[in-house]
Amino acid sequence: MTIAITGITGNMGQAALAQLSNAPNIGKIKLLCHSKKRMKKLLKRHKSLRPRIELVEGGMSDRNAIRRLISDAAIVINMAAVIPPRSDQNPKAAVACNQIGTQILVEEIERVQADQPALVHVSTVAVYGNRSGAHPFARVGDPLLVSPLDVYSATKLRGEFCVLESAIEKWAVLRQSAMLHPQMLTDNIHDGLMFHTTFDSPLEWVTAHDSGVLIRNIVQKFVDGTMPDKFWKRCYNIAGGASNRNYGVNSFDDGFQIIGGKTTDYFRPGDNATRNFHGVWYLDGDELNDMFEFQSQTTSDYWQEVFRAHPVFKLGRAVPKRVIGYFMFRRLYKDKNAPHYWAKHRDEARLTAYFGGRENYEKLQRAKWKDFTLPDRNSIATKSDNDTPVYYGFDFGKADNDLTAADVAAAATAHGGKLLSEFDGDMYKKLDWLTQDGEKFTASAYTVLRAGHWFNPIYTDFVWDFDRLAKNDKVFASVWYDTHAADEDVTYSLDDDFKAHATVFSAKAAQ
């Protein structure tokens, strides 16, 4: 049996390949190869696999390469993605891979008439957008409010929608959580991306190792013929479990403890965004783990591994903390991805998206840690999604078989729109819907009610219009207003050159 894989040189891909090298009964493995140099280096570590590996040279947007990749494959694992910070530095590459590449992959699989391969598509927690307010818990089906000006989340959202609405007979979408990987420390000291993480972001970590085990177990069950039928045609969250939940500040603390410090030793209160990141604690993460039993490592396990692999970090304990703070972190203020750079170069759009405006940003620069309240890791165990439920417009707890036409229509009404088709109980039948703007779109009841998609400008343009939409969309409003004021009237957009804009509109006129 032939397995086709994309994204194999990424952190999750490398972990998956390492696990597949020990998996029995797997035949040929075809790998999409965009970089020969990186692939050659990777294969040196897996010599036992080399006789079974076939390299297909090309990128995700290369239709001929994709066609060769999936030829004779029984299952395709799509882990390819251009992620931050590269997606910020080269947004066109993110569009080509995350959006166009996924569309091409779907189209080529759909073209296969006999023995069509199954598709496992890896999506991202980023589709949920910012959840650092009253709704830190999320489940598949929650509204998808991708963070303004984030090309990565927008392109991944579009790619995921393409898979959900495809004619592929067997597909599954896996939304990857925050992932701890071997290069995490070194990767995060070269870019201002670390300043996007809000200190109160709810993060549920999963290690690259466990993610690789998940992919191996999915492939193994597929090859062995023991794959549960219920796995297909559904979305899942890849979760690390309750023990791997913390806040953004705790994540920094866990890393800094290696050099004997904590967040407040190296960062200033005004360094990091106060909103517009992405991260959640998963309510339904057990579902995937129950099927594939991949969760084994905790965040503590991960950091102990890092310490053993890089004992040189221990030397940092002998260096004054102010020196580390200056030379390792404050030097990144000049990076184009850092809020300090945005402020200096008058990027008002990003200051608004990430801080609520320049005034809020500058006030934060004057704050001292003694005046700043950081979330308490110990409080996580006392929190529950029942404290502030997400509004769906219908009884989300109903089984699919019990959903009625009235339930589906109510979901559309809650979005300020309308169901135009008759729902006959088939969750995957294409239905016509009308948005609050009078735009017609087609999607299944599963895509809207169970996967959380609802058409808006971000599906076709780099326009984040959630301030306006939330005024008439109760589903969006139930989450959006956790970190945005009801009187905010900003439309965020990226032009053809990916320059950021923030335009104030008239809320009264919109209503």
Image: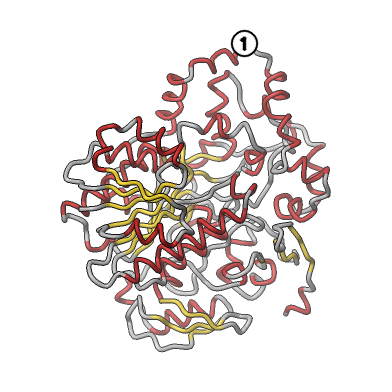
Q: Which quadrant of the structure image shows residue 368?
A: top right
Which percent across, then down, holds residue 145? 57, 62
Which percent across, then down, holds residue 395? 42, 72
Q: Which quadrant of the structure image shows residue 269?
A: top right
Which percent across, then down, holds residue 159? 48, 62
Is residue 381 visible in this depiction of the protein? no
**SS at mark 1 in the image:** helix
* Outermost residue, top side: 318
Instruction: Please determine whether, in this image, residue 316 is positioned above or below residue 97.
Output: above
Which percent across, then down, holds residue 302? 42, 30
Q: Check the image and tell me how it is coloured.
A: secondary structure
Is residue 296 visible in this depiction of the protein? yes
- Left or right, 335 with respect to 159, comes to right
Residue for point 53% across, 50% down = 82
- Left or right, 52 with respect to 332, comes to left
Instruction: Please determine whether, in this image, residue 421 is positioned above or below residue 198.
Output: below
Q: Nearer the viewer, residue 59 or 154?
A: 59
- What crowding class fits label 1: few (fewer than 14 Cα within 10 Å), some (14-19), or many (20 or more)? few
Instruction: Please determine whether, in this image, residue 396 is positioned above or below residue 318.
Output: below
Residue for point 36% across, 34% down = 297
Q: Amino acid at mark 1?
A: Ala
Q: How many marks?
A: 1
Q: Disc 1 marks which residue?
A: 318
Q: Nearer the viewer, residue 238 or 385?
A: 238
Residue for point 47% across, 84% down = 432
